[in-house]
Each structure stands twice: as C-alpha cells, then as structure tokens.
Image (tube, rainbow, N blue to C red):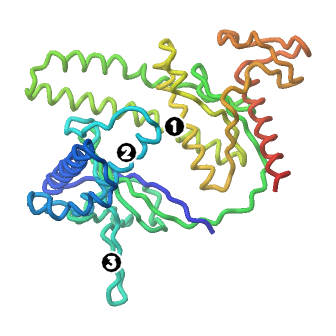
Amino acid sequence: MEKILRGYIFRMYPNKNQQILIEKSFGTSRYIYNYFLEKSKEYYMNAYEYIKELPSLTKENNWLKEVDGCLLRTSIFDLDNAYQKQRKERKGILKFKNKYQSRQSYRTNNIINHYKEKTYESIKLDLEKRTITLPKLKEIKIKGYRNLKRINGRIISATIYKEADKYYVSLCLEEEVITPLFIPASIVGIDVGIKELVVTSEGKIYKNQKQIKKYEEKIKGLNRWLSRAKVGSKNRYKIKKKLARTYQKLKNARKYYLHRISKEIVEEHDMIVTEKLTITNMVKNKQLSKAIYDASWNELIRQLEYKSKWLGKKLYKIETYYPSSQICNHCGYQEKKVKDLSIRKWSCHNCKNENERDLNASINIMYEGVKRYIEELQVS
C-alpha cells in the first residue's frame, strides 16, 4: 500500500454572493502576497516569522476578516515557495501580483476536527449531489467526473481559481493505492517532434494538431481591436473577456489531446522510455520556438510520469544528447550526416538498412530503456 497525491479539477457555478466573496478572496490573497514581498526586499524572513505578523495586520485591516483566514497563511507559504525556487534557480526576480492577470487564484487547506466521535472537515465533496463545501462560501454547485460517484481519499487542500469568466476548484487528495509487483510485459520508446507529435517504437503515430494555427488569426484580430479600444471602456472589457476565452479554448484543446495520448500509452505499456528535453535551449531557435511551445512536450512527459507512477509502471528518461536519430537500430552504426533535421529517411552506410528518422529514433530510445532496466536488475 502506497500513499500518493492526486488532483481533481471541477468547474464551479457560484451564485452572485459567492462570486463577490471569491473575488474578495483573490484580492486578499494578492494583498498578503504583495505586502510581504515588499517587506522581504529589505530582509527576507521565513514563512513562519511572517505568519506571526498576521494578527496585528488583521487588526489594522478589518476587511481581512471577511475571507477564509486560512488563505492568509497559504499566501505567505506561496511566497516562501516562490522565493526558495528563485534562490535555487538563481534567475529572475519575484514580481508583484496584480488583478489584471489572466488567472486569479487562492488556496485553502482542509481543516479536520474531531468532536464527540464525529469528524468535521472544512472542505467537503459530494459527487452524488454534485456540490462542494468550501470555507466561508458554503455549498457550491460543481461539474466534472460524471462517471465518478465517490472519491476515496483525504482532501488536503483546494485551490479556487478563475480563468476568463469561469470558476474552478482544484482539489489535492491523498489516496492509498496498492502498488502491484512490477513485471514488465511490454515496453515502448517514444520520440517527440514537431512534424509528428509522437512516434512510438511500434510505429504508431500521433499527429501534431498544431492547435495554435486554429486560434492564431482570432487572437491577432482580438489583439488589434484591444489596442484600438479606449482604456476603461466597456468595449475594451468585452474584448479582453473574448481574448481570455479564446486562450482558454486553446489551452483546453492542447490539454485534452495530450491527456488522450498519455493515457493510451501508459495503459498499453509497462515501461515507457523517452528523452530528457531541454526546452529552454531548443526555443532559442526563433524559427521553431512557436511550434515547440505549441507542441507542449514537457507537459506530455509530465503526464506520462505521474500516470506511470499511479499505475505502478516505469518511465525512463535517457540522456538529452543521446544521438537516437543518427544510430541505425539494426547494426548500431552512427551516421553523423543525419544531424541535419531535413533528412527524414536515410540508408545505413554499414548494413544498408533503410531508416525512417522518427521511427528509428524511438526504437533506439526503447533499446536504451531496456539497458537501464537490466542495469537496475543487476544492482538489486
């Protein structure tokens, strides 16, 4: 038995009073984050030191008491996480949050109390009634996971967020899963690209849908209208809303397609092998940067990683600079001229085997995964 963290996202339908309170919560979360970020410019203290200042801050600002008190602390922890990440990566500076960002959010924790042999939780999910109970907001109608009648697990936290004009809640649950004994029956190597999004070692091809092309003209047109609209006008507000909805449709279309691919690959195979990708270096090529961002390779690999873990399967990542496209999968001869991306098919100089670039790469990636697995068995 193993404990894992799993996320569930639901669309929320709050009434007018709940919407007002949610918007106030967004504003409060921003205020706390920005207030302590400003203080940290002189000298940064840890999150627990800042939390000690909250009682005096709420006395000075009574409006902070209108929202869920837990979000005041989580906003400080979010700042602390951002600061630790910035220190670790040693790049960029922390920016202040503003109300014009496309996504507004706040996080609250599930507080569990026991009284007279009863358990009380601040966050409750009822999939039969299709409602969620959140601190201060009470019951809100939700939509999503229509085939689920119950989720077995302990709710740890909830992130309430807004994209365009739609409200969502993302729940983080701790679930207990039985991890089966790992006995691999099938292995697959995958090669990601721009022309074809995924090519597997079995020869299966997942087309690149190039979602950006479907929405690019509409986004350009809306941005032109936005630049002409008067600042503060109703028309400008309407255009911004349309633009946010368009971006959301683009994001959702990408996400849905990637989930479909990752689910299929993980369910059909016990071992998945892919390459480590350095996207930051790849996007330096200005001709390919837009296509690389649109392909969302990192998101696909992220999905494969956590879905493999959930199902007790294995994902291997081979080294970034392994020349998978250049090596003949039949004899192992390396053809260096294949570095040229325009070469899609090539004949091996050593064994005369005809190799298709992406399929050949995925087969070589699979072989590397087999080697890694054998090395692990020898060590254990």
Could you tell me residue 79's position as x and y percent? 32, 48
Could you tell me residue 83's position as x and y percent? 37, 45
Nearest to N terminus: mark 2 or mark 3: 2
Q: Secondary structure at mark 3?
A: strand
**Which residue: 31% across, 20% down?**
218
Nearest to N terminus: mark 1 or mark 2: 2
Residue highlighted by disc 1 = 299
**Which residue: 75% across, 57% down?**
182
Could you tell me residue 284's position as x and y percent? 50, 18
On-image quarter of the C terminus? bottom right
**Which residue: 80% across, 21% down?**
327
Query: In the rendered structure, which amino acid carries the disc numbered 1?
Result: Glu
The image shows residue 171, relative to residue 34, as above or below, that is below
Q: Secondary structure at mark 2?
A: helix
**Which residue: 63% across, 34% down?**
276
| Separation of marks 3 and 1 at Cα, in angstroms | 37 Å
Badges 3 and 1: C-beta atoms under 8 Å apart?
no
Please rate how many residues cluster around mark 2, counting C-alpha atoms within 10 Å: few if below 14, some from 14 to 19, many from 20.
Answer: some
User: Quarter of the image holding residue 193?
Assistant: top right
User: Quarter of the image holding residue 34?
Assistant: top left
Residue furthest to the right: 351
Residue highlighted by disc 2 = 82
Nearest to N terminus: mark 3 or mark 1: 3
Tell how many labels: 3
Please rate how many residues cluster around mark 3, counting C-alpha atoms within 10 Å: few if below 14, some from 14 to 19, many from 20.
Answer: few
Residue 305 is left or right of residue 13, and the answer is right
The image shows residue 21, relative to residue 302, as above or below, that is below
| Separation of marks 2 and 3 at Cα, in angstroms | 32 Å
Query: In the rendered structure, which amino acid carries the disc numbered 2?
Result: Ala
